[in-house]
Image (cartoon, rainbow, N blue to C red):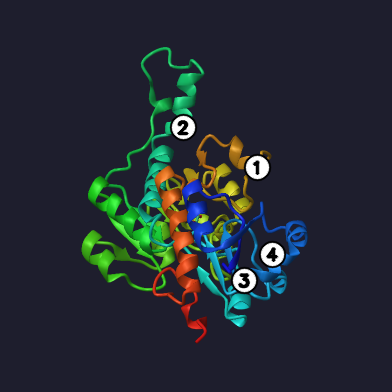
């Protein structure tokens, strides 16, 4: 008999077939208590859980006594109660490498679109405002050779540093938990404490996971330390930033502009003041959202589930230490 798994995200058809070849799959639309109650037997029997976007906490785990592996179609795993998984020796698999370059492209898109006001001026063209040769009220600011400060020098930070250094001649500052010798050697990146990075950077780019330590790490004090000409970019997790403080900093001219792919609440409510500010580019969490990368993430997640259930946790495992015998 094939092992039972729960799938809570639609995958490309061929990947769902790959899953069906190995598992008995119960497909559910989400992980809400209603859905879990409706499919109680399937949740009780499942040894695997595959998807993205739902909370996997102690309450859900109680309904899944047979669970051995969770596989998320994402690099971030802030939706998972890792302590609760560890306590039950349940493996957590994620997709850390396949999306690196694509997310770095998104960060660079935010850098360019905020500095050069791409979205705002394109909207003005569509609105019929381009009637004569443009003047300074359409101008942006340069990106090339400006200083970029990267907070979080993981894989994506490295890929952003490469673009900034090699493509745009930008001096790279970075702040991270550890010094990153490779970033220093390849991109001439300079390690700074956070205050120095905030004071010296023209672009402050945040690529941090959400943890107890990073929640609201950016607030009024951090925005006050930034240059009034600085542009703030966040493509990590929304709650790393106190959004009310960011809105105040943008309104008060503490910083020049913001490019945001992530928000405290997603989808971003239509009532958010961020949507009324011309100096904000707000994207719908598209960091990894290309056809190619989303396919590769889904394929990785399917393979991760199979590998982990077979005891292979050499790559893409958040908590390999919990592997049982
Ligand atoms: C996207 O935000 C991810 O964690 O993959």
Q: Nearer the viewer, mark 1 or mark 4?
A: 4
Report the residue marked by disc 1.
272
Q: Element at badge 1?
A: loop
Cβ–Cβ under 8 Å for marks 4 and 2: no
Of callouts 1 and 4, which one flags the residue occurring earlier in the amino acid sequence? 4
Cβ–Cβ under 8 Å for marks 1 and 2: no
Residue 232 visible in the snapshot: no
Q: How crowded is mark 1: few (under 14 residues within 10 Å), some or many (20 or more)?
A: few
Of callouts 1 and 2, which one flags the residue occurring earlier in the amino acid sequence? 2
Of callouts 3 and 1, which one flags the residue occurring earlier in the amino acid sequence? 3
Nearer-the-camera pick, 227 or 53: 53
Report the residue marked by disc 2.
119
The image's mark for residue 42 is 4
Alpha carbons under labels 1 and 2: distance apart: 18 Å
Report the residue marked by disc 3.
81
Of callouts 3 and 2, which one flags the residue occurring earlier in the amino acid sequence? 3
> Residue 134's quadrant in the figure?
top left
Nearer-the-camera pick, 225 or 288: 288
Q: How crowded is mark 2: few (under 14 residues within 10 Å), some or many (20 or more)?
A: some
Of callouts 4 and 2, which one flags the residue occurring earlier in the amino acid sequence? 4
Q: Element at badge 2?
A: helix
Name above or below for residue 273 compared with residue 130: below
Residue 233 visible in the snapshot: yes
Q: Residue at x 59, y 47 (%)?
A: 247
């Amino acid at each position: 008999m094939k092992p039972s798994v729960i799938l809570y995200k639609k995958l490309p058809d061929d990947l769902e077939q790959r899953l069906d070849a190995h598992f008995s799959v119960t497909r559910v639309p989400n992980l809400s208590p209603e859905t879990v109650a409706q499919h109680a037997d399937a949740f009780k029997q499942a040894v695997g859980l595959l998807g993205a976007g739902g909370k996997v906490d102690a309450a859900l785990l109680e309904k899944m006594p047979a669970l051995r592996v969770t596989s998320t179609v994402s690099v971030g795993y802030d939706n998972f109660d890792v302590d609760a998984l560890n306590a039950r020796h349940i493996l957590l698999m994620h997709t850390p490498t396949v999306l690196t370059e694509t997310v770095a492209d998104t960060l660079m898109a935010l850098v360019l679109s905020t500095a050069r006001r791409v979205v705002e001026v394109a909207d003005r063209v569509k609105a019929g405002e381009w009637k004569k040769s443009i003047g300074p009220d359409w101008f942006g600011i340069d990106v090339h050779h400006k200083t970029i400060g990267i907070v979080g020098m993981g894989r994506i930070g490295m890929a952003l540093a490469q673009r900034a250094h090699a493509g745009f001649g930008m001096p790279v500052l970075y702040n991270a938990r550890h010094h990153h010798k490779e970033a220093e050697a390849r991109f001439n990146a300079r390690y700074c404490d956070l205050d120095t990075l905030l004071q010296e950077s023209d672009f402050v780019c945040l690529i941090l996971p959400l943890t107890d330590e990073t929640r609201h790490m950016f607030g009024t004090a951090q925005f006050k330390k930034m240059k009034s000409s600085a542009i703030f970019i966040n493509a990590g997790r929304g709650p790393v930033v106190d959004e009310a403080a960011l809105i105040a900093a943008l309104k008060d001219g503490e910083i020049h502009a913001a490019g945001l792919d992530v928000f405290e609440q997603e989808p971003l409510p239509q009532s958010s003041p961020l949507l009324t500010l011309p100096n904000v580019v707000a994207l719908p969490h598209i960091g990894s959202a290309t056809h190619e990368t989303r396919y590769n993430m889904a394929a990785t997640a399917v393979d991760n589930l199979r590998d982990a259930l077979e005891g292979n946790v050499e790559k893409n495992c958040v908590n390999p230490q919990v592997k049982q015998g």
